[in-house]
Amino acid sequence: MSNSKTIAVDGMGGDEGPSAIVPGLAIALERQPDLKFLLFGDEKQIDPILEQHPKLKAATIVRHTDIAISMDEKPSAALRRGRHGASMWLAIQAVKSGEASVIVSAGNSGALMVMAKIVLRSMPGVPRPAMAAIWPTTRGQSIVLDVGANIGAVATHLLGFAVMGEAMARSVFGLKRPTVGLLNVGVEEAKGLEEVKEAARLIRESNLPIEYGGFVEGTDIGKGTVDVVVTEGFTGNIALKTAEGTANQFGAFLKQALSSTLMSKLGYFFARAAFQAVREKLDPNNNNGAVLLGLNGIVVKSHGGANAQGFASAVSLASHMAGNRLIERIAGDIEKMQLLQKEEK
Amino acid sequence: MSNSKTIAVDGMGGDEGPSAIVPGLAIALERQPDLKFLLFGDEKQIDPILEQHPKLKAATIVRHTDIAISMDEKPSAALRRGRHGASMWLAIQAVKSGEASVIVSAGNSGALMVMAKIVLRSMPGVPRPAMAAIWPTTRGQSIVLDVGANIGAVATHLLGFAVMGEAMARSVFGLKRPTVGLLNVGVEEAKGLEEVKEAARLIRESNLPIEYGGFVEGTDIGKGTVDVVVTEGFTGNIALKTAEGTANQFGAFLKQALSSTLMSKLGYFFARAAFQAVREKLDPNNNNGAVLLGLNGIVVKSHGGANAQGFASAVSLASHMAGNRLIERIAGDIEKMQLLQKEEK
């Protein structure tokens, strides 16, 4: 039995390691005082920081290990070195054993995916696990998947992503009937990749309770045209990082323009609260946490560059999904999908 | 012999048709008084607007046709109806016949690509034509291709895109040794799609005078890490439109935040020139014009929603490329590519 209030944490991941993670856990605990943490990593680094947060210390069990996966280690090398011993591996293992309901890591994405797949394995019937990102939109937030767990996808993989993304949108956003769209180069039925067109047919003909919103284009992601955007992992990763780059670029242009004249500096002075609000809305630290879906356990990947605030967002997201029984929802939906596919045959 | 100062114009394309196009030509002519235009379309709509621009009228020959391709017409239907008669078709034909050096249209992209391929045909040795977009970056501008002329690409197609994009960067940006990168999900050699890894090998081993910058990620596009970003058309189109959506979103957030309090409104008042500068920098009308490369003639696609200013940008880009003999540059580079490939065998 998993304890839905206990979160396993890879204490050594991310650019700043325990010095961002431990204060991040303290912030998450402030928000949700009933959380418990199983924290894996080097106690020599963790304990001194933990001492500064007595409430957190009381809610946390530290499990020591000397092995930490570095951010630039190749997944294959990470696996050889870290299998059975690294903080990341042990944290995932805690979900498998049922000690924790969900694992959060800010570490090496590739290593995390490989280890998670080995330890937790795919849920029965899931064609492929997928990495889902929460994307801020003008309407609120959407889920985009796959953003890089796989390279390449056939139509049945995309159907699986749609089912898992829809379950996540119900769980995370509390929507009854989230809308699901397929990312394509045009909204007309005849356009785009064969796999995407075939996936559209599968979704329409599946009779699954999916509110299918048709094809969507790149511009629709930021608009929030649909709640769940389904795409293959290569394209999804490029889209996610292109959006990140564009937001940075916009910020850089604005900064430059606002410091160019006395008038604009004065303007910035008066409007700084507004700029702060926009920055926060687009700050990856406030929209932090991609989720690896389709395994027998929830794996949340925090941005490697996340600060304490950012890591706390990822932890809150993780606890939210665990509390909403995301795994059970996905299992139910995947079962429906399989039954319908069998009927078709 | 093509007249490098004469530009063929599809007078009926775009959301606003002649009422944006004709004033757009007038603006382009102000900037470059030696341009001449061959303008195809409905003279009943064109002539009254042309009357308001006497200088433009003197530099323009209007060729009447009743047939105009609509923005939402399927390419196959557009071809059936417009072959040999539509303003778009006739404007392309003027490049083929040598009356004009380049064609500009704000019309239906799909129809334009199909017609251009039929009329102008691929240059000898070009594996596939590609649509290249000019992308504003924090460093200046880059070229991204293919943004949607093709769906799917093998390694040799990507090599061809690299060669054509590099020639365009020399022509449009005046760079001697533009850098070229391949869009991928990571910068490590082992990552990504097989086609992309194979294209990297082809570029490295080709001995072509390409300044190869390795793999780049989505975030690198906006940074301007390389001058030319090469990718397959589906992904390129999604990236382009995702960036457009993100920029719109950023603008919407900012607008909302700046009108939220009295202080922020005051700030906007003082800094409005700065906001205007950012808006102009990111305005698609000021970075307007995607270019279809690899045909026996240059085809410039203006954004369908471009206003007069936007259409003028596309015309200036077109005349610039014609003046810099882009076609000859590409032909030379493609020939080198073929010779090297033969040597390899």
Image (spheres, coloured by chain):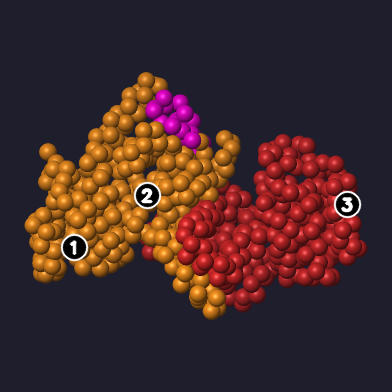
Chain colours: A red, B orange
Marks counted in the figure total 3
Q: Amino acid at mark 2?
A: Ile
* Chain at tag 3: A
Residue at numbered disc 2: B134
- Residue B210 image offset from top left, x and y in percent: 41, 31
* Chain at tag 1: B
- Residue B250 image offset from top left, x and y in percent: 50, 64
Residue B159 placement, left or right of A140: left
- For this rendering, which residue is in front, B64 or A130? B64
User: What's the CA distance linking mark 2 and mark 1?
Assistant: 23 Å
User: What's the CA distance linking mark 3 and mark 2?
Assistant: 52 Å
* Chain at tag 2: B
Residue A44 placement, left or right of B21: right
The magenta span reads B196-213
Residue at 10% in and 67% down? B51
Residue at 49% in and 42% down? B225
Does dot 2 land on a helix, a strand or a loop? strand
Question: Answer yes or no: do the residues labelled 3 and 2 have beta carbons within 8 Å?
Answer: no
Residue at 33% in and 38% down? B174
Camera sees residue B177: yes
Residue at numbered disc 3: A48
Q: Amino acid at mark 3?
A: Pro
Camera sees residue A202: no
Look at the image and tell me in which quarter the N terminus of chain A lies.
bottom right
Residue at 42% in and 65% down? B273
Does dot 1 land on a helix, a strand or a loop? helix
Residue at numbered disc 1: B22
Q: Amino acid at mark 1?
A: Val
Does dot 3 land on a helix, a strand or a loop? helix
User: What's the CA distance linking mark 3 and mark 1?
Assistant: 71 Å
Q: Which mark identifies residue B293?
A: none
